Image: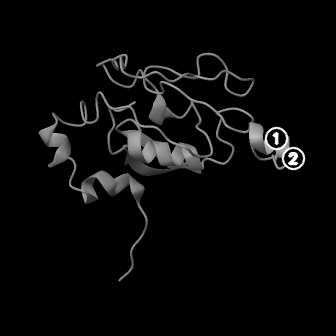
């Protein structure tokens, strides 16, 4: 008996389609009105899990959110949208102390290694995003709260 990691099946494993999602009106509304915050390696705003035009039902403007979208050379204006409502970086201390690795990290909200993007997508990524690695399709992924921001 072996177990393989397959995060594309996590919503089914957790019973979300018949449970919490169903109770909240389906994946089209699950998580709506919730803003999730992450402290991680950054985020890739071009990842389809964070696009705001995937649904015919536009994301609402979160009235209770007071964060910012920090614009840098690596994270240009327009990186945030109605799905990815804000992003900041906190590299100043590492830069000042001389421990910032500019060959690997960004002095911006952009994700240097993909960890933050993956973590954010598992929690808040859009529903039904094709997972394609090296030309192979591994199914469609969804965040656990796909309408969250």
| Whole-number angstrom distance, CA of label 2 to CA of label 1 | 5 Å
Question: Is residue 102 visible to us here?
Answer: no
| Left or right side of 37 for 19 | left
Q: Residues within 10 Å of mark 1 (few under 14, many from 20)?
A: few
- Quarter of the image for the N terminus: give it: bottom left
The image shows residue 93 at horizontal and vertical percentages of: 76, 41
Question: Is residue 30 visible to us here?
Answer: yes
Image quarter for residue 22?
top left
Image quarter for residue 87?
top right
Disc sitting over residue 141 in the figure = none
- Quarter of the image for the C terminus: give it: top left
Q: Is residue 137 above or below residue 148?
A: below
Here the colouring is: one colour
The residue located at (16%, 36%) in the rendering is 24
Q: In the structure shown, which secondary structural element does the residue marked by tag 2 occupy?
A: loop
Q: Nearer the viewer, residue 6 or 38?
A: 38
Residue farthest to the right, as pictured: 98
The image shows residue 99 at horizontal and vertical percentages of: 83, 50
Q: Nearer the viewer, residue 64 or 137?
A: 64
The image shows residue 53 at horizontal and vertical percentages of: 41, 20
Check if mark 2's residue and mark 1's residue have beta carbons within 8 Å: yes
Residue farthest to the bottom, as pictured: 1
Q: Nearer the viewer, residue 142 or 31?
A: 31
The residue located at (22%, 49%) in the rendering is 16
The residue identified by callout 2 is: 98
Image quarter for residue 33?
top left
**Number of marks:** 2
Q: Nearer the viewer, residue 116 or 37?
A: 37
Disc sitting over residue 95 in the figure = 1
The image shows residue 40 at horizontal and vertical percentages of: 58, 46
């Amino acid at each position: 008996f072996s177990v393989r990691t397959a995060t594309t099946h996590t919503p089914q494993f957790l019973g979300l389609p018949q449970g919490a999602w169903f109770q909240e009106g389906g994946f089209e509304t699950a998580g709506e009105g919730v803003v999730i915050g992450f402290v991680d390696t950054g985020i890739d705003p071009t990842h389809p899990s964070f696009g705001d035009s995937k649904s015919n039902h536009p994301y609402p403007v979160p009235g209770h959110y007071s964060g910012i979208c920090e614009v840098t050379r690596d994270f240009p204006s327009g990186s945030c949208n109605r799905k990815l409502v804000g992003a900041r970086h906190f590299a100043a201390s590492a830069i000042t102390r001389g421990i910032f690795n500019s060959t690997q990290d960004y002095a911006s909200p952009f994700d240097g290694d993909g960890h933050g993007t993956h973590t954010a997508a598992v929690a808040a990524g859009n529903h039904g995003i094709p997972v394609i690695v090296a030309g192979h399709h591994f199914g469609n992924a969804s965040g656990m709260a796909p309408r969250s921001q």
